[in-house]
Image (cartoon, helix red, strand yellow):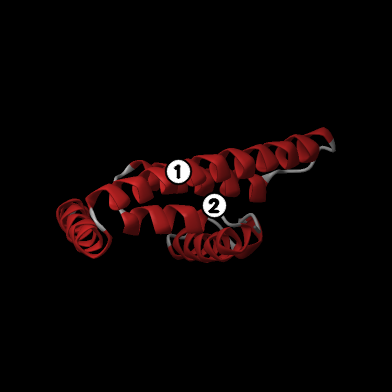
Amino acid sequence: MLVLALLFLVIPIVELYVIIQVAHAIGVFDTLGLLVLDSLVGGWLMKREGMGVLRRLQAKLSTGELPSTELVDGFLILFGGALMLAPGFLTDVLGMALLLPPVRAVARRLLARRFKTTIISRGSASLGDVIDL
C-alpha cells in the first residue's frame, strides 16, 4: 500500500518535471504538440495491436485452444493504453513500449514467472497445474 501511495505521489511530480524541462528546451507549444502527437500515435498503435490480438484470440478459440497468451497480451495492451492516458512523457514511453510485441513478450514471461512463483509458494498448485504462457 505504501508503494502505491509513493507511486501516485512521485510519478506525477517526475512527469511534471520532465514536461517542464522539455518545454524549456523546445518551447511550450512544441511540447504540447509533442504530447498530442504521442497520444495520437499511441492510440493508433493500441488499436492496431488490440485488433491483432483479438483476431489471434478468436482463431485460438475456434480451434478449441486456450488463448492464454492472447489474454495476457490483451491485458498488457490495455495497461499500456491506460499508461498513455496519463499526461507525460515517461508514462507514454512505458505505455507505448508495452504496445510493441517484443516488449510484451518479455513482460509476459516476467508475469508468468511471477505468477508461477506466487502460486507454487502458496501451495495451492503444483508446477504442472500452472498454465504456461
Q: Earlier along the polypeptide chain: callout 1 or callout 2?
A: 1
Report the disc number at residue 99: 2
The residue at which mark 1 appears reads as 81
Q: Return the x and y of residue 88 as percentages of the image width and height.
A: 29, 51
Instruction: Identify which residue is drawn at 63% across, 56% down.
Output: 129
Q: Amino acid at mark 2?
A: Leu
Instruction: Indicate left or right for 13 with 76 as reference.
Output: left
Between 133 and 104, the one nearer to me in the picture: 104
Mark 1 touches mark 2? (CB < 8 Å): yes
Structural distance between the alpha carbons of marks 1 and 2: 8 Å
**On screen, 90 above or below 37?**
below
Q: If the image is split into quadrants, where does the C terminus sit?
A: bottom right
Between 63 and 90, the one nearer to me in the picture: 90
Instruction: Identify which residue is drawn at 74% across, 42% down.
Output: 56
Instruction: Identify which residue is drawn at 23% across, 51% down.
Output: 28
Is any part of residue 79 visible from this angle?
no
Q: Return the x and y of residue 10 as percentages of the image width and height.
A: 17, 58
Report the disc number at residue 48: none
Instruction: Indicate left or right for 40 with 49 as reference.
Output: left
Instruction: Indicate left or right for 36 with 61 as reference.
Output: left
**On screen, 77 above or below 27?**
above
Residue lying at the far right in this picture: please name it.
63
Neighbor class of circle 2 (other Cα within 10 Å; few <14, some 14-19, many 20+) is many
Neighbor class of circle 1 (other Cα within 10 Å; few <14, some 14-19, many 20+) is many
Instruction: Indicate left or right for 71 with 29 as reference.
Output: right
Is any part of residue 12 visible from this angle?
yes
Q: Quadrant of residue 19?
A: bottom left
Q: Amino acid at mark 1?
A: Gly
Q: Return the x and y of residue 11 as percentages of the image width and height.
A: 22, 57
